[in-house]
Amino acid sequence: MHPSPRFRETDPVLLLARIAAHPLGIVMVNGEAAPLAVHTPVIARQDGDGIVLRFHLSAANPVTARLLAGAAATLVFTGPEAYISPDWYGEVPDQVPTWNYLSVEAEGAVTETGREGAASFLDDLSAVFEAGLLPKPPWTRAKMTPAAFEALLNGIRAFEMRPRRLEGITKLGQNKAPEMRAGVIEALDAQPGGAAIAAAMRALD
């Protein structure tokens, strides 16, 4: 994570919303010879005073083997991001390029949820994301033959993490003067793909 505490984000409600908006996470573990990483969609929820992150991986993935062996994991989520040109600060000398972005990191032990947990996760995963495709009729596993679904379950493992650390980075030029930030926001509005970071910067002001 970025070392500056001024960019550190710890509000769990905000972090959960950020994961929900950008749910494709990277699961990272220590491998035998080098770190291992894999992308996977994650469903996050509040559970009492804690957070639960659920995901699944191919049974054949090397990350899966490490998790089943008891390795702890780090999950990383990247939200909107944008390159920031020094020219956008106006007539301010001695500036360098940088990057504004929103991210989340979760770290902790991971538990396999078993075959029933894997089936439940796939049901919940499709329910969450099919809801965003309305008015298309939602896909459910009822459209599969039971045998095909059972065969699919043979090839995956589902996990959940209750993070011992959940933090994010909100790096939106908080270390710059208001007039410099205003110049960046105006420039980002004119850049393809820059609107999301511009909006996040406005919300921070």
Image: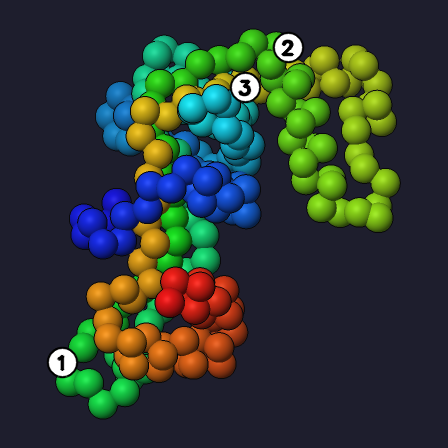
Q: Is 174 drawn above or below residue 132 in the view shown?
A: below
- Judging by the rendered image, the residue that carries numbered circle 1 is 94
- Alpha carbons under labels 3 and 1: distance apart: 50 Å
User: Which residue lies at the image location 39% right of the left edge and 62% below the top edge?
Assistant: 204
At label 1, counting other C-alpha atoms closer than 10 Å, the crowd grade (few under 14, some 14-19, many 20 or more) is few
Lower position in the chain sequence, tag 2 or tag 1: 1
Residue 136 visible in the shown view: yes
Q: Which mark is residue 164?
A: none
Residue type indicated by callout 3: Ala
Residue 158, numbered circle:
3
Say which element carries label 3: strand
Name of the residue lying farthest toward the bottom? 91
Using the image, determine if residue 165 lies above or below residue 116.
Answer: below
The residue that appears at 53% across and 30% down in the rendered structure is 45
Residue at mark 2 to residue at mark 1: CA–CA distance = 58 Å
Query: Which mark's residue is nearer the viewer, 3 or 1?
Result: 1
Residue found 84% across the figure and 48% down from its top: 135
Q: Pointer 2: what residue? A: 116
Q: Is residue 61 visible?
A: no
Dot 2 lies on which element? helix
Direction from residue 183 to residue 19 in the image, left or right: right
The residue lying at 71 percent from left, 46 percent from top is 132
Q: Are marks 3 and 2 in contact (CB under 8 Å)?
A: no
Residues at circles 2 and 1 in contact by the CB criterion of under 8 Å = no
Q: Nearer the viewer, residue 35 or 106?
A: 106
Compared to residue 3, the image places residue 72 above or below, namely above
> Which label's residue is closer to the chain start, 3 or 1?
1
